[in-house]
């Protein structure tokens, strides 16, 4: 019995490593894929419709923020490393235009986790799982708080990097709007896909 117990420990460790690897691949590739859609889809349409200097630094539908929220919602602090890898991959591929210092990715990869912690301190609990995905309206509110955290973090980093406050502060509005709308669009899309899938399963049953 003792020998069997000792043998189960390495197996458990391997299973956990595989799970974390799968999580890392899914989240990081999901983040990078969302960046591709923004850069080669949303941003091109946005610039074609309204080419304003302020919008040169942000997308008004920033879908990767939805990936941040979903990842933090489902796995909490474990989302930080996969999101970091996704952000670094996006930077390496030039999907973020390389206009910010590399350490400006920090607010983005932690903002979702911190936003859920804020609500947890306020006594509002979000339980991960398929059933709790119906709380998407609450998740949009979390997305807004996370967008504020991310926007303020980026602005602080840019100011510390030497940019003028007057130049940087107006961008905060764009960051918050883009992140919040992007998360709403992605979450809404996920809810619709989930509903269509359930209807298909019910029809087959």
Image (tube, helix red, strand yellow):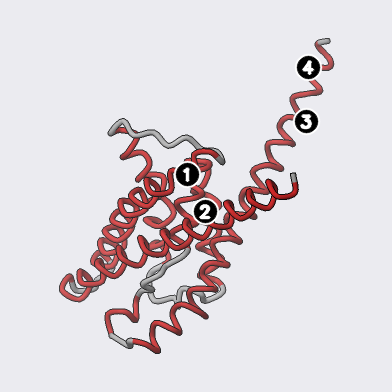
Give how far across and how far down residue 34 sits, in percent.
Answer: 53, 67
The residues bearing labels 3 and 1 have C-alpha atoms spaced at a distance of 35 Å
Q: Which mark is residue 134?
A: 1
Q: Which mark is residue 11?
A: 3
Judging by the rendered image, the residue that carries numbered circle 4 is 5
The residues bearing labels 2 and 1 have C-alpha atoms spaced at a distance of 8 Å
Which residue: 52% across, 53% down?
A: 191
Which residue: 42% across, 67% down?
A: 62
The residues bearing labels 4 and 2 have C-alpha atoms spaced at a distance of 42 Å
Q: Is residue 203 left or right of residue 87?
A: right
The residues bearing labels 4 and 3 have C-alpha atoms spaced at a distance of 10 Å
Q: Are discs 2 and 1 less than 8 Å apart at CB?
A: yes
Seen in the picture, residue 200 relative to 59 is either above or below; the reply is: above
How packed mark 4 is, by other alpha carbons closer than 10 Å (few <14, some 14-19, many 20 or more), is few
Camera-nearest label, 4 or 1: 1
Camera-nearest label, 4 or 2: 2
């Amino acid at each position: 019995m003792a020998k069997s117990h000792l043998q189960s420990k390495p197996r458990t460790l391997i299973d956990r490593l595989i799970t974390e690897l799968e999580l890392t691949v899914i989240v990081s590739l999901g983040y990078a894929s969302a960046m591709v859609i923004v850069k080669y889809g949303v941003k091109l349409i946005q610039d074609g419709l309204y080419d304003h200097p302020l919008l040169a630094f942000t997308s008004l539908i920033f879908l990767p923020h939805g990936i941040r929220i979903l990842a933090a919602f489902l796995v909490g602090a474990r989302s930080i490393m996969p999101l970091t890898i996704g952000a670094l991959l996006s930077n390496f591929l030039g999907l973020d235009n390389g206009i910010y210092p590399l350490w400006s990715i920090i607010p983005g990869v932690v903002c979702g986790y911190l936003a859920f912690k804020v609500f947890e301190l306020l006594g509002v609990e979000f339980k991960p799982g398929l059933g709790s995905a119906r709380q998407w309206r609450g998740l949009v509110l979390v997305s807004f708080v996370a967008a504020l955290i991310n926007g303020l973090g980026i602005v602080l980093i840019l100011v510390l990097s030497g940019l003028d406050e007057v130049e940087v502060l107006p961008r905060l509005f764009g960051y918050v709007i883009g992140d919040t709308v992007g998360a709403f669009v992605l979450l809404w899309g996920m809810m619709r896909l989930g509903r269509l899938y359930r209807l298909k399963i019910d029809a087959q049953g």
